[in-house]
Image: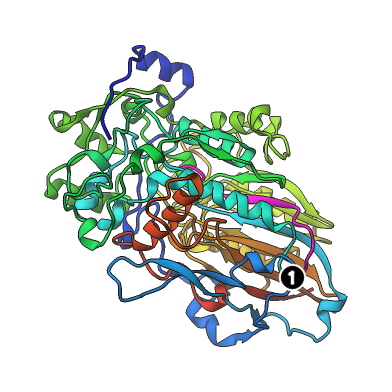
Amino acid sequence: MSRIRSTVTAVDRRSFLAAAGAVGLSTGIGLAVGTSGGSGSASAAPAPAVTGSRTPAATTPTATPGPTAPTGPSAGRTTLHSLAAPRDLSATFRRLGDGPGWRRVVREQFASAKSGREDRRTVLSSFVQLTDLHVTDVQHPVRTEYVRSQSPGAWRPHEALSVAGAVSLVEQINALGTGPATGAPLAFAMTTGDNTDNNSLCELDWYLTLMSGGLVTPNSGDREAYEGVQNSGLRMYWHPEDGAPDSDKRLGYPRIDGFLEAALRPVRSPGLTLPWYSTAGNHDGLTSGAYADRTGFLAEFAVGDRKLFDIPDPDAATLLARISQGETADGGALISLLRREKRRMRTITADPRRAPFTPLQYLSAHLNPANTGAGPVGHGYTRENLAGASLDYTFSMGENVTGISLDTTDHGGHFTGSLGTSQLDLLERTLKEHRDGYVVLFTHHNSWTMGNKRPDPAKPGEARHDGNEVVALLRRHRSAVAWINGHSHRNVVLPHGSFWEISTASHIEFPQLARVIEIADNKDGTLSLFTTLIESAAPRETDFTDLSQQGLASLYRELALNAPGSRQDLAGLKDARNTELLLRR
């Protein structure tokens, strides 16, 4: 694609950042680092087992096979019926087609499945969980694609199509209408964080627009041209629009003329027709999910006209190791690198929309009437949240069921999470207030990725609490039935003595899933929590010449399947996919 420099008005970056409230606030950088484990990486399994919990491997033998056929009116649009699967596993570049669905597995660790329950049950709540959309500005200056020289999974070739992929998921949710297990109308949708990838204002705008409905132009900087790594001439990145070999073409990635132009075209989203709620993740609170730079350097660099595309291999290895280990939560290692590598940088078009957003800006954007869509106003957040700078709230999920959304991001930095004492107190009060009902906890992080106890800069004297403590609190209250989260990009379902923890795969990495969850009272002393995975509405077979919005969504999925360094186990175990989870009540 030819590069055409547009004429833009010069931006006084410090004035803009001061007005936006970004200088000196928590910003930084993080990234997916494949199997090495970074902010966007997929944890292999719960590492330290919390008290009373089991790892997925330990729970597998107790799973009981359920019916093989879809059961509800919308089941044909779910993975119960069929799903995208490689047509030839031996191929270098695997093409997708229709594959067999995943049967529902009944899990009876807490209660036995009694016959006739399907005729007795009453549905208490029915909703959809989306998580880890990672709506991505692929031209953002603070991205660290260059560590790909040391870890292929540190940069994903398909990221430029994240908006088209997310819109196709919205279309699929709209088409469902009812729960696939019970046939009850879906009441709402909930995102569980990492809605954006790099904590930038333009990504936040794109995310809110695709969820609420409207036109999204996934481009920043030069309005007429792409200025990222995929036409840079650096062969460690996939260059879709030329015939020269690169690291990805050697693995079978195709040449697709017009790809970059198509990736920057406006995308029309119908918006969710369901009311939807929002939970924040670490990529929504820290620049790309890991670093809290309080100096303002990265915030200023984000809106500037310089971008680093490659660095010497030893420097890439050092930075990758430090990111993966979370050694420098303040962003110091990245800042030092950017300060000393100015001569390697290329000129791009400055854009104030790339500035990091603050928690207050995140709240204000959700409360903006332009982003209400199907509602509710604020999508869970209220004016009280804005006044208290809090990203935590409770809401009604249905008859006698209360949801509570908590921000597990540690704003002191790092890609793992925790809760502050005030948040843990709010959770306990909610559980006590609804002791005669049911409570569902929504967070971004899961129990095994909540070990970061760095103080929150806004509350330096407040203690932080890990996943073990959250599990212990939930276990003390009979009203807790489920903890629903994401972050690890893999389907995991864990029993914790008296409630289920349900962690769902991302929509940035294959198999790109969301999850329908239905809570039903079986009228026999048990509850059933049905979980059913769904894909986007995009055709499973990809045509490389089809660069329509729908064609790009299909391409997004197939490129994700083949992304170098990507994990192949993110669908999780069979008993973490389509399930019926029994609870005694």
| Residue 6: x %, y % from top left | 32, 19
Residue that protrudes farthest toward the front in the picture: 545
Is there any visible trace of residue 485 in the rendered image?
Answer: yes
| Residue 32: x %, y % from top left | 35, 52
The amino acid type found where label 1 is placed reads Gly
Residue 353 occupies quadrant: top left
Residue under label 1: 72
| Quadrant position of the N terminus in the picture | top left
Magenta-drawn segment: 181-196
Is there any visible trace of residue 368 in the rendered image?
Answer: no
Tell whether position 184 is magenta.
yes
Q: Is residue 53 above or below residue 5?
A: below
> Going 68% across and 63% down the picture, which residue do you hit?
517
> Going 63% across and 86% down the picture, which residue do you hit?
64
| Quadrant position of the C terminus in the picture | bottom right
Mark 1: few, some, or many residues within 10 Å (few <14, many ≥20)?
some
| Residue 170: x %, y % from top left | 60, 49
Tell me how the rendering is colored: rainbow
Tell whether position 182 is magenta.
yes
